[in-house]
Image: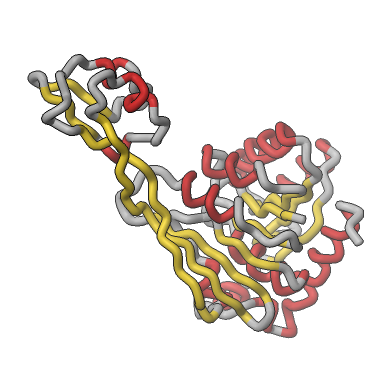
Amino acid sequence: MNIAVLSGKGGTGKTTVSTNISLALNANYIDCDVEEPNGFLFLQPSIDRTDGVSVEYPHIDEEKCISCGECVKNCNFNALVNVKNEIMVFDKLCHSCGACEIVCKSGAIKYKLREIGKIEEGKRSHIKCTRGILNIGEPMAVPIIKKILNNIETDVNIIDCPPGTSCNVVNSLKYADMAVLVTEPTEFGLHDLKMAVELVRMFDIPFGIVINKDNVENNLVRNYCENEEIDVIGRIPYSKDIARIYSRGNMLYDDLKYKNVFDEIAQSIKGVFSWN
């Protein structure tokens, strides 16, 4: 069972919720926010395995290339350009679709591999922790996300999704059985929450809302959830004490004052999704 934790924007507390409910549910933690994988800073697992992630890109054999330009015409991603009868390759734009190799009649195109990031695995106590890391300057995170999620355990998994509603989130949600949306009670938070709700509804999976930095005086999100008949499965109070614990890199679940907050969210998840 895969539980995706996502938010309409960054900075809402998505990783805080993901890491702490991993402990509350005794579930595997998987950080798919590969551009900014912060979960390990809090869980601090002992890393026992690292694998590189590579993608294919075209290599032009200049001795065979006749500069016909067929590869350029058939590249939908502008990764190939014909300049003064020479084919130039922009490897970071390549989506490894293979079209250029297929249409090359002179056999001048072969594919090579280049590393774009890595996947680390480790354990915190008996919880398996996995994270993807995209190399700086690399534009495409999806190959790393797919490699992580194609190999996850058939167990209870918490998927810490990238922020927003981009294709990185969409590719993470493809593997989810349910979703937890984290938001904050501000107009910006509500605006982006609505986009996240629309995205999750497209996948037709059950979901609930966790309100972070909850201020009882502000009912923006709660009013929205009531009107949309969406379950609010948890509230994390607005607190300087929580901010201090977070800024020190400590887990809220390890603090007795806040452990029950995430235990209640875990119970709500089980209730909302009828999970035994």
* Image mark count: 0
Q: Is residue 260 above or below residue 64?
A: below
Q: Position of residue 178 (x, y in %)?
A: 76, 49
Residue in the image at 72% along x and 55% along y? 3
Q: Is residue 111 above or below residue 33?
A: above
Residue in the image at 69% along x and 83% along y? 255
Foreground of the two, 255 or 178: 178
Which quarter of the figure is the N terminus placed in? bottom right
Residue 259 in sight in this render: yes
Residue 218 in sight in this render: no
Residue in the image at 56% along x and 66% along y? 130
Residue in the image at 60% along x and 77% along y? 123
Q: Position of residue 170 (x, y in %)?
A: 59, 39
Q: Position of residue 79 (x, y in %)?
A: 29, 30
230 left or right of 73 in image: right
Give the quarter of the image for residue 39. Answer: bottom right
Which quarter of the figure is the C terminus placed in? bottom right
Foreground of the two, 115 or 160: 115
Q: Position of residue 54 (x, y in %)?
A: 39, 51
Foreground of the two, 4 or 257: 4
156 left or right of 64 in image: right
Give the quarter of the image for residue 155. Answer: bottom right
